[in-house]
Image (cartoon, coloured by chain):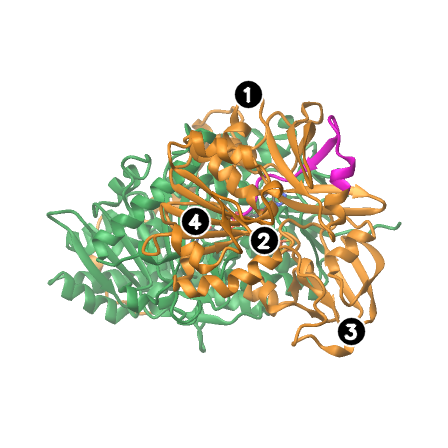
Chain colours: A green, B orange
Amino acid sequence: MSEKTYDAVVIGAGNGGLSAAAYLAKEGKRVLVLEKNNLPGGCATSFRRGRFEFEATLHELCQMGDGPEPGAVRQLLDDYGLDVDWVPINESFSSVNRDPVNGFDVFMPDGVQAFIDAMEKAVPGSRESMTSVMELARMCGDGVKWLAGYHNEPEGLAKAEMLMRYHDLMKVVPVSTDDMLRRLGVPDKAREIFESYWDYVSADSTQMSFAVYSFMTYTYLSQKPWIARKRSHEISLAFDRRIREMGGDIWYRSEVKRIDIEEGQAKGVELSDGRYIPCPWIISNLMPHVVYGRMVEPSEVPLREKKLMNARIMGQSCFTIYLGLDASAQEIGLKGYDTFVRTTGDTHQQFENASSLETHKDYCVTVLSNAIQDASEKGTCLLQFSKFFTSDVFKDVSIKDYFKLKDKIALDTIKDYEKLSGCDIRNHIEEVVVATPETWARYIGTPQGDVYGYVPVSWDGMFARVTAGHKIDHAIRGLRFCGGHGTQMDGYSQAYLSGAEQARYTLLDMKEAR
Amino acid sequence: MMKYGYDKSKLKGLGVKPFLDMENVRNKKIEEAGDSLAQAVFNSNILASKLHPDVQYCLVKEVIDRGNAKSFVLVPDKESGTESLSYFRAGQYISVALEFEGNAVCKPYSICSSPLDALCDDSSYMITVERNKTGFASDYILDNWKPDSKVMVSGPLGDFYWTGLRDSENVVAIAGGSGITPFYSMACAIADGIEDFSLTILYGNRCFDSILLRIELEQAALRSRGKVRIVNVLSDEMRPGCEHGFISSEIIRKYTDLEDCTILLCGPRAMYSYEDTQIPLLGLPRRRVRRDLFGEYGDPTGDSLYPVLAKGKTFKITVIMRDKETVISCPSEMTLLCAMEKAGVHAPSDCRSGQCGWCRSRLESGNVYVPSSMDGRRMADEKFGWIHPCCSYPLSDIRLEITELKA
Ligand SMILES: Cc1cc2nc3c(=O)[nH]c(=O)nc-3n(C[C@H](O)[C@H](O)[C@H](O)COP(=O)(O)OP(=O)(O)OC[C@H]3O[C@@H](n4cnc5c(N)ncnc54)[C@H](O)[C@@H]3O)c2cc1C
Ligand code: FES
């Protein structure tokens, strides 16, 4: 049988892998995507129980927007030609800090001005400094957009222009969110409310670049957070269809066991069923820890890559509780779409607390039914809790204790929220699914169930990674990495952008090699 | 130049140098780090592979004759690479892979033993297989599995188990025939102290002699310190100590605190149909009644929504597996999954009830009929043309892309 050959192979059909494959296919390359699960998306998926369909992960997409000036991600996904029914979320977030002295309980609307107004109401006297924050954020956003116009690699004159136009951006990139907000004179309470989103970017506000965090928040406010009507599975399947339409192939239940590397050059991949696919251009949606730790001959792992892995901190792992309730959100009294519940407003303390089962009392509550009214049958609703752990909290859990522990964490969380909100949840649970770090470890194959790649600590933030993403971090010819562990940090939008970025670099590599 | 309304003075003292130095700082950090190869497998990963193995290789250790049924005790086949069997939640099932006479089939069977038996040193599962009129796979097992037979099963599957997060601590189980198997596992789990809820099993059988696992159930009840109770309901025999008739709403009421209970059902199709007329009379909310897998749907051509034009026809099915294609045929009353199995195609399946999604495949062209009660697809699957072959019937010639299982 004459076997079809491929210009490029993408390992993993997560958000990053799908985007990379779509990008290459769109540029006319024959691409093969290899995915170990029987469906695409990785984290971006859904599942059914009884009469409910649960969203696995997507709370909100960033950099979307619509109308004449869509965000970068919306543009990218539209360029791919994805057929997705996008739904905007018409609010920002609710944030509850249960600190007995400095606590708060606020609902923050979407829209920059509305957000500032709500903040002023919650924290009188915050208006002026918050306005400064937003304006700086707007500047950062413009800078990011400008940089994207140069594919993040301004050269020559452009470099000079950057110094002229965006020196303030350059100034605030290395400053942490916390420091910058203090510098701008944002009152403590307003600062803590503003920092509520940190869980989604995995580094706390003492580590997280102000430019990156404020830009992200600003985009959420100005362009709204977005989701897909038929869950994130709709996005993943839209990718699947487009990749095929553009001439690509996707093989499911096709786990890559080995990446063949010879003298620093990628040669092909081997599947767990023994099939070998020769191909000198490989994009891995799996993180370097997985690739170098399990799939590459140890002698072929470049020294710098070993050091880079050791220098980095693994991102959060995740614990999620999915509930299908037999009454509507209104009947139960569930308010808001996304609510952060914390015991302190100090994000660094939150990060520390999240490193052990005993001290991690925080969680995020998502009521999908408050964003999509008919997300489930009439008279029912969907409710989800997520907790992000900052260390390997399941490291000592034995098989025998596993189910009990899982149920206990879930029960404690639900009870806690009942107490806080006054809602009766437990008497309405028709379906429940609990996912632990173990579940994620199994499903996407990451070490300790990491769902956020590497923590973007101050020295390894987005700007530093992006700068290194083309050449400096490119260690093996023909092998590139994309995904939530990539240059753009974790998250859907970031993984999509990272896939496109690394696909583009691969195209440049191909040209160079000719 | 753009105008921004922030107070520039607040940036005083900040320069662009740290930005320009960013890469050097990062390189230095990396340079300073150790050069060992980082760990990539953690406890979560190990737990994951122990709780959800792709496949478990087993040996039949013992065959127990139970009249119209047999129980098989399965132990790990260490030579083939399975060291111990996965822990599970009482009520879960395994999918058994069978290959005979050119068929390649997977069939679900509830694990009919205590989860503790899987965890102990000589790890084991028991499954109990009843002889039935239609199930050619069950007959194959009953006639061919002997001590030392090698068998291949999946990891534990399904969500028909008790959880305090959702269910009442007062559980009333309604079982018919071999539908007792998940409840026997639950009874053992309670007796062994790994589950803590009270379980009243209303067990329907024709006559006293046809009660499966009767003595074992009694023993589990004895060991359970009053938590497990068995009520035999005989349809064809009057007997002291047993209820007579079918498991009607009156009988259920007699043994149930309707204010606080969870009802679990497992049994043959006929029992489900009967209970569909009885359970609603109890006025319980939907979350309080849970049913085990329905199993295969059977011939759909009599359904009121079935398009009559397709009836009695046989269609050409092109099955695509990666870069290979096979052409098979499928009569209108047969599921695409069964047609593939009969043709020896290693098509994936677990629940065979439309619910688990394991058989999920891409319908490249053609039309199928999916009985609405079986349609457990995700919304986007329907939008983009993905189907569950275990409950999809052809209405035309079809091109279907599946992901083949390893032989
Ligand atoms: C509960 C939760 C909520 C979240 N909410 C949000 C949110 O609201 N907004 C947001 O932007 N982000 C959110 N995220 C983060 C976001 O989901 C991830 O950052 C993003 O999906 C990462 O994508 P990825 O490209 O790294 O791929 P992954 O999702 O990691 O996918 C990797 C893929 O590779 C496959 N694979 C692994 N090993 C192999 C192998 N050997 N061979 C073949 N295939 C293999 C896997 O099966 C998987 O499909 C959330 C995450 C979680 C867990
Ligand atoms: S085998 Fe479970 S859905 Fe088909």
First in sequence: mark 1 or mark 2? Answer: 1
Residue B64: numbered disc: none
Residue B172: numbered disc: 4
Estimate the x, y position of residue B370 in percent, counting from the top left. Answer: 65, 67
Mark 1 secondary-structure assignment: loop
Work out which residue is located at the far right of the displayed protein and give it.
Answer: A1
Q: Which residue is mark 1?
A: B121
Residue B317 lies, with reference to residue B198, above or below; the image says: below
Amino acid, disc 1: Asp
Q: Is residue B270 left or right of residue A168?
A: right
- Please tell me which residue is depicted at 52% across the width and 39% down the height of the picture: B184
Q: Which residues are magenta?
A: B140-159
Mark 2 → mark 4, Cα distance in angstroms = 25 Å
Residue A441 lies, with reference to residue B261, above or below; the image says: above
Of all chains, the one bearing label 1 is B
Mark 2 → mark 3, Cα distance in angstroms = 28 Å
Residue placed most toward the observer, B73 or A257 = B73
Mark 3 → mark 1, Cα distance in angstroms = 54 Å
- Please tell me which residue is depicted at 55% across the width and 21% down the height of the picture: B121
Q: Quadrant of ligand 2?
A: bottom right
Amino acid, disc 3: Lys
Q: Is mark 2 within 8 Å of ligand 2?
A: yes
The answer to whether tags 2 and 3 share a subunit is yes
> From the image, which quarter does the C terminus of chain B lie in?
top right
Q: Are marks 4 and 3 in contact (CB under 8 Å)?
A: no
Q: Are marks 2 and 4 in contact (CB under 8 Å)?
A: no
Check residue B279 for magenta coloring: no
Q: Which residue is mark 3?
A: B311
Amino acid, disc 4: Val
Q: Quadrant of residue A408?
A: top left
